[in-house]
Image (cartoon, rainbow, N blue to C red):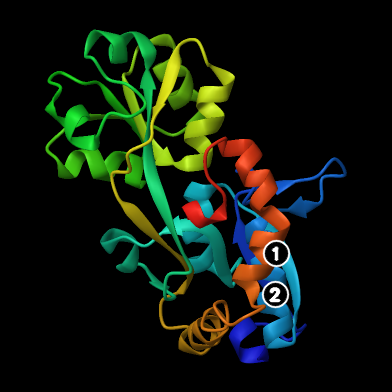
Amino acid sequence: VLASCQREDNVLRVGMDLKYPPFETVDLNNKPVGISVDIANALGEFMGVKVEIVNTDFLSIIPALQSGEIDIAIASMSITDARKEVVDFSEPYFYFKILSLVNKTFAIANNLTIDSTVEDLLAVENVNYIGLASQVSTTIPQSYGKEVIESTSLATAIESVAQGTADVLLMSANPVVDGYQANPTTTMVLWDSFVSSPIGMAVNKGNQELLDQANAFIETFNVPGGLYDVLKTKWDATILENLGRFGLEFY
């Protein structure tokens, strides 16, 4: 276990960006809370080590793994080919549906509704997509041959859609719905999912021992009374409140 943590204090340092409720966030006392925090703590129990949550900006998580600042990332990180070149991923433990936050004026002009399909959206010409650099919000539209304005800030990307300087932002459900709830008169959610993006834990290249332990841990999620059941019991009401449409089954 100690070798997996790469230190001798029996602490597993778990990196995540605490800006994405209800998966990664903080409570009123600035204490890390959320679904990913619960997963991290359960991994620590499984391994018999203490867990330290290291709040890390999402774009800095892979460099933090490479530098040894953190041991593992449990950060709602999509498994992509580009990322697999620089880190090793566990088996997927969630599949996040990638939805679209759409500028409402653009939607009305192009006859798009909350029940339109991805094909309906892709058929629209001259769409200004905006996405976060090096994330699926950029790479998915690009895979369809679309040009994407790259942003380093989720808040800026959402504001761009709300103000109409961009038309569409692809993200997982919570950021999209949060963006809509903050801008209900100028945006809408297109609920048809582009893909179900596999979410994995990440370790630095070559840290096979920790990767094996993470995968052994993930194998326990589906047993009766396992972590999936625990998380659904604890978080479904919150997710339903946040999404307004789906519970944890959505993931």
Q: Is residue 134 visible?
A: no
Q: CB of mark 1 within 8 Å of CB of mark 2?
A: yes
**Image position of 71 (left or right of 28):** left
Which kind of residue does numbered mark 1 sit on? Asp
In front: 4, or 140?
140
Question: Residue at label 2?
Answer: 42
Q: Could you tell me which residue is drawn at 35 percent across and 54 percent down?
A: 196
Numbered disc 2: secondary structure? helix
**Image position of 231 (left or right of 244):** right
In front: 99, or 153?
99
The image quarter containing residue 226 is: bottom right
> Measured along the vertical axis of the image, is residue 242 above or below residue 226?
above
The image quarter containing residue 213 is: bottom right
> Measured along the vertical axis of the image, is residue 77 above or below residue 146?
below
Q: Could you tell me which residue is drawn at 57 percent across and 49 percent down?
A: 247
**Image position of 49 (left or right of 107):** right
Label drawn at residue 101: none
In front: 29, or 134?
29
Pick the quarter of the image with the N terminus. bottom right
Q: Could you tell me which residue is drawn at 51 percent across and 90 percent down?
A: 209
Which kind of residue does numbered mark 2 sit on? Ala
Label drawn at residue 38: 1
Give the alpha-carbon distance from disc 1 to disc 2, as whole Å.
6 Å
